[in-house]
Amino acid sequence: MAKTTLKRVHGYLAEFESASDVYHASEKIRDAGFQRWDVHSPFPIHGLNEAMGVKRSSLPFFVFFGGATGTLTAFLLAFITQVEIYPTVVQAKPANIFTTPAFFPIMFELTILFSAFTTLFGCFAFMGLPRLNHPLFASKQFKKFSDDGFFICIEARDPKFHQAETKALLEEIGGKNIELVEDEL
Amino acid sequence: MHHSLTLDDLPRDGEKLDLAKISKLNGVLLLVGGIGAIISLIYLFGFANTKDEAGHVVVNRQGEFAYSWLFAFFFFFTITCGGIFWTMLQHISNSGWSVAVRRLFENLGGGVKWMAVLALPFPLIPGVRDSLWEWYVIHKEAAHHAHEAGTSTKEALHHMAESNHHLHILYGKYGYLNTTFWYIRAFLYFAFLIGIIGLLRKWSIQQDKDGDFKHTFRSRALCAFPLLFFALAVTFSAVDWVMSMDYTWFSTMWGVYIFAGGAWGAMATSILALTYVRRNGYLQKVVSGEHYHLMGKLLLAFTIFWAYIAFSQYFLIWYANVTEETRFFLLRNTGPWWYLSNILVWGHFVATFVLLLSAGRKKKTLSMNWVCAWVLVMHLVDWYWLVIPERAPSLTKGELLLSPGAWVGDVIAFLTIGGLVGWAYLRRLAKASLYPCRDPRLLESVIATN
């Protein structure tokens, strides 16, 4: 029984010689107005964010509110237990809002903890992690990205994607081994 | 992004500040400082005191003004020490990014020799010294008794403590807190601070001429071990002149607290100075928004650091609840001082912290101006809160935020020292290039990104 699997085009994968090649290629793709594309390299490349035209992440905005939630949680936790439910008098210190200094360490810690959690899980959420597989893993040559290969992948989801034109663009800016990566459905 | 810049794009001999360009501000500072100095001298030498027919002092303006002078002196002294600290820190950490702005810190710290001059009223005018430091008066009395009885001052103190138990702590602290050692220490602090910043500044300016990088290595070597002495000098100057106003109180956090506020104020002052010289057309290519961002980050770091130290000091004392320690905060948490304490919590820390969180704001010159002005106002409140409440127990005056008559002295002292120090700072800036123009790390600094 011959079986035909359905396939969906994921995008074009092109290899580049060096970090500087991939950097300059990124600038050209950025200027061509592509949105859904990415660079894969074995190590971080300085200034690549600007070269790709990546906007500043909105994660800090969420982290601020994550941290503020931590402060409030800690305050309420301490206040409700130490003042409302079970006032503990120590050294004749008041068991009311003026005991705040004693709440500060836990407020400080939970602010940091919640900020850290927001950073970590927010980062995962923005990156679409965790995921079990990625279409690019279908490509044999893509394995090199974690060793000595510099790749650019322009995805078919991009509104500017065009099977012939995008390939021509990648060739023009110096892409080698251009491959149409297909994702098995 | 200045990636295209090379050293050839920068002026070969750096940029010299033209005093004529800033004559307006400089003139105002000198005028305010000069007039203030005359009025301050009248106060300091006690000519403003009111006496009755018998010649007894009724209103001790000299004593009140001593507190004003200490408050204003320390506001600027901590900022100056902050300038020394940042200079040393950049040398010791091999900082590349900060070369373009380092000269501002060097010149800010260079003012410490004038701070030494402005500190002279404290030891030289007995009326000023005795109203600030009660322990000194007691020691003088003990010395007098000792002279009569032919014993040592320490024994005389012990004898005095039998009738007045409060004095026993002075007997216990005698090894550190005695008049001779107090003078020697004061001399050592200033000798060290003047010496170290003098050398660093001298080598840095020499490098402008010969471009030799041995100066860079020498500066780094000079900063390594003496950074410890810097910490000791700042800590114990604060202990000797501010903490000892109330000889019964002590706090082990004190020195760090003073240092944190000073480094914070110095960074804000330098950002403002940087903006000011850029407004006048200097440092256009050398400094970019990146430097503002980096300096803003350090400002944020020290906002948090100050809060951490300030709270730790409060927290330990609040928790331990030991009578001889709580006195300091009891005084400052009651009456009108309670409002000032809250301004410190919400203004000195919370507001500044939230304002400085945003990366975009740290890069914008205009918004950083406002933040830095705010920082300096808060540093001022901090020092007012540290020094002025002590007027109350010492002179039975100062339970109020602005005690009648005395607050005028606070303003005059602040304007005097501020005017003179600001004027000297701008003149120092004009003495050499505004940035180390032949520092080996200059290009690294110019194209710095973060």
Image (cartoon, coloured by chain):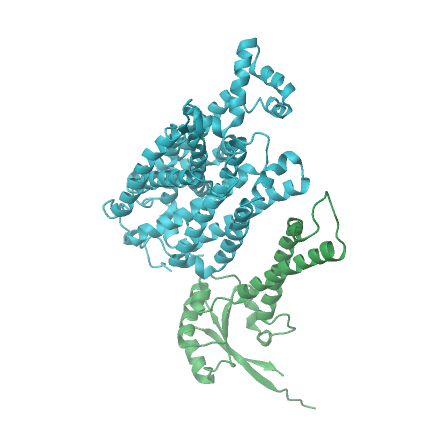
Chain colours: A green, B cyan
Q: Which residue is drawn at 50% across and 72% down?
A: A38
**Is A28 situated above or below B238?**
below
Residue B441 shows up from this direction: no
Q: Which residue lies furthest to the front in this view?
A: B53
> Residue A72: horizontal and vertical position, in percent?
63, 60
Horizontal side of B30 relative to B304 (left or right) equals: left
> Residue A138: horizontal and vertical position, in percent?
59, 76
**Is B48 situated above or below B164?**
below
Q: Residue furthest left?
A: B20
> Residue B5: horizontal and vertical position, in percent?
33, 56
Q: How many labels does the image show?
A: 0
Residue B55 shows up from this direction: yes
Q: Residue at x 59, y 30 (%)?
A: B248
Horizontal side of A122 relative to A19 (left or right) equals: right
User: In front: B401, or B431?
Assistant: B401
**Is B192 situated above or below B266?**
above
Q: Give the quarter of the image for residue B201.
A: top left
User: In front: A115, or A54?
Assistant: A115
> Residue B156: horizontal and vertical position, in percent?
59, 15
Q: Give the quarter of the image for residue B254.
A: top right
Q: Which residue is drawn at 42% across and 73% down?
A: A30
The quarter of the picture where the N terminus of chain B appears is bottom left
Q: Residue furthest right?
A: A86
The quarter of the picture where the C terminus of chain B appears is bottom left
Horizontal side of B153 relative to B211 (left or right) equals: right
